Image: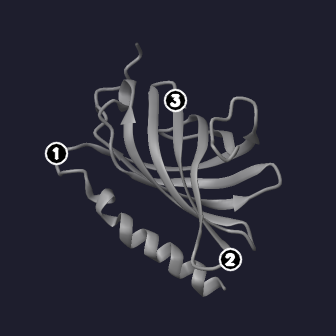
């Protein structure tokens, strides 16, 4: 069972490797490694499945709030694995980061792993690109996880405050 979940996640990684190599050598990249705590909410949730979370990233480059909306759900290779996609938005003091999220959730132990491709942004993150990875565990009220990777294409002359 654990082997199948690992194989599913490895398959997702292979399929998404090309999106993680978008930054060229001239772009400035910054590392991301921070905890996320998120809770389910219903009012205002735009997911066709009624699954949304709102959360907090308390530290690092992407300190701010999060909003995740599940857009698709499908079974994985085993009955224990659920595959999903969604929109993940991180709102910081310096702007927003819009992410296309692809993930796998193990329904037996609640663990999950996600590939988070940056698709657009505002403010300091207007030209941002890169791939982030989120992994963690579901809780009765939401998720506890860590987001890591790198964000490239942000200006290095300081934050944009307008």
Q: Residue 80: where, in percent of width, then height? A: 69, 75
Residue farthest to the right, as pictured: 140
Relative placement, left or right, of 87 versus 150 is: right
Q: Mark 3 touching mark 1, by CB under 8 A?
A: no
Q: CA distance from mark 1 to mark 2?
A: 45 Å
Secondary element under disc 1, as helix, strand or loop, is loop
- For this rendering, which residue is in front, 79 or 28? 79
Sort mark 3 into few (<14), some (14-19) or many (20+) by Cα contacts within 10 Å. Answer: some
Sort mark 2 into few (<14), some (14-19) or many (20+) by Cα contacts within 10 Å. Answer: few
Residue at 37 percent across and 20 percent down: it is 160
Secondary element under disc 3, as helix, strand or loop, is strand
Sort mark 1 into few (<14), some (14-19) or many (20+) by Cα contacts within 10 Å. Answer: few
The residue wearing badge 1 is: 26
The residue wearing badge 2 is: 79
The earlier-in-sequence mark between 2 and 3 is: 2
Residue at 64 percent across and 83 percent down: it is 2
The earlier-in-sequence mark between 3 and 1 is: 1
**Residue 41 position (above or below residue 29):** above
**Residue 160 position (above or below residue 9):** above
């Amino acid at each position: 069972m654990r082997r199948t979940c690992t194989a599913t996640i490895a398959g997702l990684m292979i399929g998404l490797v090309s999106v993680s190599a978008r930054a060229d050598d001239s772009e400035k990249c910054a590392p991301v490694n921070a905890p996320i705590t998120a809770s389910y909410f219903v009012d205002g949730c735009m997911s066709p499945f009624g699954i949304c979370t709102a959360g907090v990233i308390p530290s690092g480059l992407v300190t701010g709030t999060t909003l995740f909306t599940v857009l698709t759900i499908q079974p994985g290779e085993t009955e224990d694995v659920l595959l999903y996609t969604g929109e993940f938005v991180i709102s910081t003091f310096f702007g927003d980061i819009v992410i296309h999220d692809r993930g796998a959730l193990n329904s037996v132990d609640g663990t999950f792993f996600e590939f988070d491709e940056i698709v657009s942004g505002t403010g300091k993150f207007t030209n941002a690109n890169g791939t982030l990875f989120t992994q963690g565990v579901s809780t009765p009220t939401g998720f506890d996880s860590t987001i890591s990777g790198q964000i490239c294409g942000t200006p290095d002359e300081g934050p944009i405050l307008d």
